[in-house]
Image (spheres, rainbow, N blue to C red):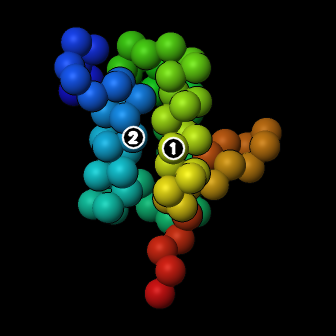
Amino acid sequence: MIDPEGPVPVYRQLATILREQIERGDLVPNRPIPSVARLQQEYGLARGTILHTVRVLVDEGLVYVVPGKGTFVKPRAQ
């Protein structure tokens, strides 16, 4: 659940939610994460906020972006 009034920025809250889903295996390697539109609808956040979240996850090495295709879970290094 996103708390817009909480001390943690909402993009960080969403990044934590998605990170946990990746770690649990709910989002699997080489498969897309939910689309920006779906995340907007599900969490009620602005497109820019979702894109900021994706940049955070890319910087952390958890996802990669394929232009025109979507954002995918990066395989874990063995």
Question: Mark 1: which secondary structure?
Answer: helix
Answer few, some or many: residues within 10 Å of disc 1's Cα (few below 14, many 20 plus, some between 14 and 19): some
Q: Give residue 78's position: percent from left, percent from top.
A: 47, 87
Q: Residue at x 51, y 27 (%)?
A: 50
At mark 2, the secondary structure is helix
Q: Is residue 11 visible?
A: yes
Kind of residue indicated by mark 2: Ala
> Which numbered marker is on residue 32?
none
Residue 61, percent from left and from top: 54, 61
Q: Quadrant of residue 51?
A: top right
Above or below residue 8? Residue 22 is below
Task: Give amino acid for label 1.
Answer: Val
Do we see residue 73 in this rendering? no
Q: Are marks 1 and 2 in contact (CB under 8 Å)?
A: yes
**N-terminal label among 1 and 2:** 2
Closest to the observer: 28 or 14?
14
The disc placed on residue 56 is 1
Residue 9 lies left or right of residue 64; in this view the side is: left
- Residue sitting nearer the eye, 22 or 49: 49
Q: Nearer the viewer, residue 41 or 53?
A: 53
Residue drawn at point x = 73 percent, y = 43 percent: 69
Rendered residue at 78%/43% (across/down): 67
Residue marked by disc 2: 15
Q: Is residue 44 above or below residue 75?
A: above
- Percent position of residue 43, x then y: 36, 20
